[in-house]
Image (cartoon, helix red, strand yellow):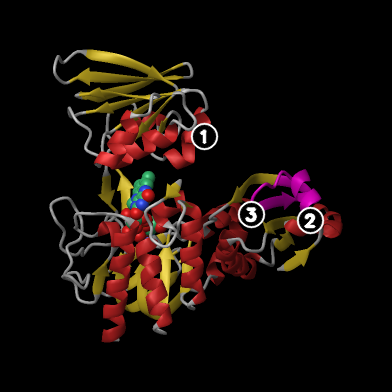
């Protein structure tokens, strides 16, 4: 692997045969997450493909010329021509490998894979999930000098990272942007010295043997496991929903509301998330129609009052979506009036769905801890599950209130309990 500058571009890249070029920046957590994976790939594929790194801030003109607008970004070249699609952000090993394999012959790939060594690493504690719960556990365990690794298929931060503004996390006079809070928390955890393995593929989890395999290659063994894998938004399973997911139907206002400037939006749901996110969407959209199955919103009173004062929002009570279609650029939501059974067509530019969450337990292997009837993990007050040396923290725990403060509290309790036991 070699570091280059813009002046070397012609010689090293355009006349360099098969090349993968990494535009990285400093103070860039996804770049830090990529660095060890890029190095491991360079060791494996280095004889056939040249691995180059280039500092984006120091080579801005070249970056602009190559349409690189975020860090890290990987570009692939063959005989001076840019090939394949670029990848950026939280890049997984499998995404790089998929592209590198396309640059080689089958014989070359077989030879390379034969050289691939399985890795086994041992830790005292594995934390599954880098949301506020997992990061807090990491801070406490790192400060207690317990050998800990935090594993996440995404970049750290969990929901905090995609929450527009957090106004109820203590310690800040003004509302904080969620991604900044996520950044501070994950940097704080890293500074304690724990290992991060993020943007990885979780191949398997065995909570009984306490073994986790990532990227099909690395087995991580631990004395104790903390599960902080959080939740995933519920879907309605209405006809058309999966067809238009990401193409008219969204589950994340922070991610997608900005595309609806001066447009009309339909919001499904009536709890806290739906009410808060509908408010946020009106920063962009000029009209929001909420569809709610009950005759009252189920959010907290302050949120309801704010919503009622917002002239851009109206609510269709006692209605339920039944089907989604697209006509031209417009989304059509077919809603049933639950009182009259009449089916109505509601036209809008986009639909947002906020109807609760389900726990992320499906990836936790065959032997799961005891769960409540909604699929959330039952723990005692130390956040121990019924499986020996397996803890659960944050939103995945069976409990009444799911907030950042309750998640960080769980992380604290589990980590202190573990520090006393090890
Ligand atoms: C839109 C929205 C707005 C919110 N606003 C607020 C607010 O203003 N204030 C507040 O206090 N709370 C808010 N919340 C709630 C708060 O974000 C959650 O309670 C909190 O993030 C839960 O933390 P967690 O660590 O348990 O889970 P999460 O934040 O969900 O993090 C879970 C992590 O686990 C990872 N993961 C998933 N599967 C696996 C796996 N198999 N292995 C390893 N890792 C895995 C995920 O990638 C993720 O990083 C909001 C939630 C939403 C959805």
Residue on which the image places disc 3: 71
Residues rendered magenta in the picture: 59-82
Q: Is residue 282 left or right of residue 267?
A: right
Q: Tell me the crowding category of disc 2: few under 14, some 14 to 19, or many 20 or more residues within 10 angstroms, Cα based.
A: some
User: Is 186 placed left or right of 362 in the picture?
Assistant: right
- Is-magenta flag for residue 81? yes
Label 2 vs label 1, nearer the camera: 1
Q: Secondary structure at mark 1?
A: helix
For residue 18, what is the image quadrant? Answer: bottom right
Q: Report the front residue among 101 and 164.
A: 164
Q: Which residue is mark 1?
A: 258
Between discs 3 and 1, the one toward the N terminus: 3
Tell which quarter ligand 1 is in. bottom left
Query: For residue 85, what is the image quadrant?
Result: top right
How many residues crowd around disc 3 within 10 Å: few (fewer than 14), some, or many (20 or more)? many
Please name the residue shown 58% across and 65% down the image. 32
Can you give x and y, in whole percent of width and height, for residue 235 in the image? 29, 37
Residue 104, horizontal then vertical, whole percent: 64, 55
Viewer-closest of 276 and 354:
276
CB within 8 Å, label 3 to label 1 = no
Q: Residue at x 51, y 23 (%)?
A: 262
Q: Alpha carbon of mark 2 to alpha carbon of mark 1: how far? A: 30 Å
Quadrant of the rendering where the N terminus is positioned: bottom right
Say whether mark 3 is within 8 Å of ligand 1.
Answer: no
Residue 302 shows in the view = yes
Q: Is residue 104 visible?
A: no
Element type where label 2 sits in the image: helix
**What residue does disc 2 label?**
59
Magenta stretch contains residue 176: no
């Amino acid at each position: 692997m070699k570091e280059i500058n813009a002046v070397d571009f012609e010689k090293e890249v355009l006349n360099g045969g098969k090349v993968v070029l990494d535009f990285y920046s400093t103070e860039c957590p996804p770049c830090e997450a990529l660095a060890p994976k890029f190095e491991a790939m360079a060791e494996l594929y280095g004889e056939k493909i040249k691995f180059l790194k280039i500092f984006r801030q120091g080579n801005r003109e070249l970056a602009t010329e190559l349409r690189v607008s975020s860090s890290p970004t990987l570009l692939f070249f063959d005989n001076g021509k840019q090939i394949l699609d670029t990848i950026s952000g939280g890049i997984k090993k499998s995404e790089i490998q998929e592209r590198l394999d396309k640059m080689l012959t089958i014989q070359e790939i077989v030879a390379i894979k034969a050289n691939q060594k399985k890795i086994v690493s041992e830790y005292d504690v594995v934390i599954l999930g880098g949301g506020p719960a997992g990061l807090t556990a990491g801070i406490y365990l790192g400060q207690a000098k317990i050998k800990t690794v935090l594993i996440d298929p995404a970049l750290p931060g969990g929901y905090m990272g995609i929450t527009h503004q957090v106004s109820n996390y203590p310690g800040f006079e003004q509302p904080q942007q969620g991604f900044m809070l996520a950044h501070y928390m994950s940097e704080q955890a890293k500074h304690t010295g724990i290992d991060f393995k993020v943007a990885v593929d979780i191949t398997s989890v065995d909570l009984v043997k306490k073994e986790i395999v990532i990227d099909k290659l690395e087995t991580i063994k631990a004395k104790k496991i903390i599960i902080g894998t959080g939740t995933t938004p519920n879907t309605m399973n209405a006809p058309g929903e999966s067809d238009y997911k990401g193409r008219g139907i969204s589950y994340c206002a922070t991610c997608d509301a900005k595309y609806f400037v001066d447009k009309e939006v339909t919001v499904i749901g009536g709890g806290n998330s739906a009410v808060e996110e509908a408010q946020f969407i009106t920063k962009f959209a000029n009209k929001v129609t909420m569809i709610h199955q009950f005759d009252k919103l189920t959010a907290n009173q302050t949120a309801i009052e704010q919503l009622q004062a917002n002239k851009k929002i109206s609510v269709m009570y006692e209605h339920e979506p039944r089907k989604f279609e697209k006509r031209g650029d417009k989304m059509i939501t077919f809603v049933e009036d639950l009182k009259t059974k009449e089916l109505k067509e509601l036209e809008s530019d986009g639909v947002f769905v906020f109807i609760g969450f389900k726990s992320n337990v499906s990836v936790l292997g065959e032997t799961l801890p005891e769960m409540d009837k909604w699929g959330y993990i039952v723990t005692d007050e130390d956040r121990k599950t019924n499986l020996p040396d397996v803890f659960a923290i944050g939103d995945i725990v069976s409990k009444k209130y799911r907030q950042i403060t309750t998640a960080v509290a769980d992380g604290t309790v589990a980590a202190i309990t573990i520090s006393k036991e090890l």
